[in-house]
Amino acid sequence: MQPYYFSFRSIYPYLGDLAAAAEITLLLSLLAIVLSVAIGSGIALMRRSTSRLLRFFAGLYVEVMRNTPLLVILYIVYFALPQLGLRLSSFNAALIGLTLNSAGYMAEIIRAGLVAVPSGQFEAAFSQGFTRVQLYRHIILPQVFRTIYAPLGNQFIAVILASSLASAVAVEEVASWMQTVGSSSFRFFETFIIAAVVYLVLCQIVNLGRIAIGRWLFRQPEAYR
């Protein structure tokens, strides 16, 4: 067996494409997390509804999304939906798949934040004449956001890592770059190392940003590490 010699020279010409791939990874992840927060918030409220039907469908959504592999969801959106007449670009299909999957986890994060608010605050607010909208806007949501802030950042990192599966539906992000360059240069080890470093850097940037914003918002940095 011949010894393996590391050489990154053959990968240098592809580094420009890597920057574009990292940009796509960040954009895809950011859009997915924003949309999943919106959908997850609705699902979380449905799970706390007085309607059994709403609670049932919200619970069903969460269970399906949290117990179905993301790759299967991406394949359904990208390959199966066109058979029903709905054709999506690779990016849009990946965005929908990531959003639907992440929303299942986000709903549970937000629901946990809602459960953490003492029920007496709801009763006190209603007794003071607050409407439900005023209650959530001025009393509940600020507390929920403080509670879920750290898990929200962790979910963002999870979405960045999960976005690597978007290469399976032809999105030209970091994992796709890794596969393409590895096949072209035959330097798979070096290419995989570079891709791993890129994901590590992206996740650390998000994590450090989360901590910095937490310090500014809450003035208690030790609680958000």
Image: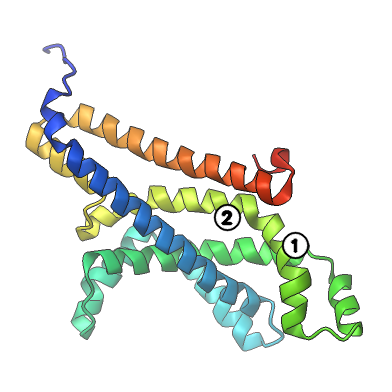
Q: Residue at x 42, y 66 (%)?
A: 99
Question: Which colour style is shown?
Answer: rainbow
- Asked if 200 appears above or below 63 in the picture, the reply is above
What amino acid does circle 1 point to? Gln
* Residue 221 visible (yes or no): yes
* Residue 67 visible (yes or no): no
Which disc, if any, is residue 199? Answer: none
Q: Position of residue 186 (x, y in %)?
A: 10, 31
Task: Label 2: state its secondary structure.
Answer: helix
Seen from the viewer's position, the closer of residues 68 and 20 is 20
Q: Position of residue 97 (x, y in %)?
A: 36, 66
Seen from the viewer's position, the closer of residues 76 and 111 is 111
Which disc, if any, is residue 143? Answer: 1
- In the picture as drawn, the residue positioned furthest to the front comes out as 216
- Asked if 213 appears above or below 96 in the picture, the reply is above
Q: Which quadrant of the rendered structure holds the N terminus?
A: top left
- Asked if 62 appears above or below 25 in the picture, the reply is below
Q: Quadrant of residue 27?
A: bottom left
Residue 213 shown left or right of residue 25 in the figure: right
Q: Quadrant of residue 86?
A: bottom left
Q: Residue at x 75, y 80 (%)?
A: 134
First in residue order: circle 1 vs circle 2: 1
Q: Position of residue 130 (x, y in %)?
A: 83, 83
Residue 217 shown left or right of residue 131 in the figure: left
Which disc, if any, is residue 152? Answer: 2
Task: Label 1: state its secondary structure.
Answer: helix
What amino acid does circle 2 point to? Leu
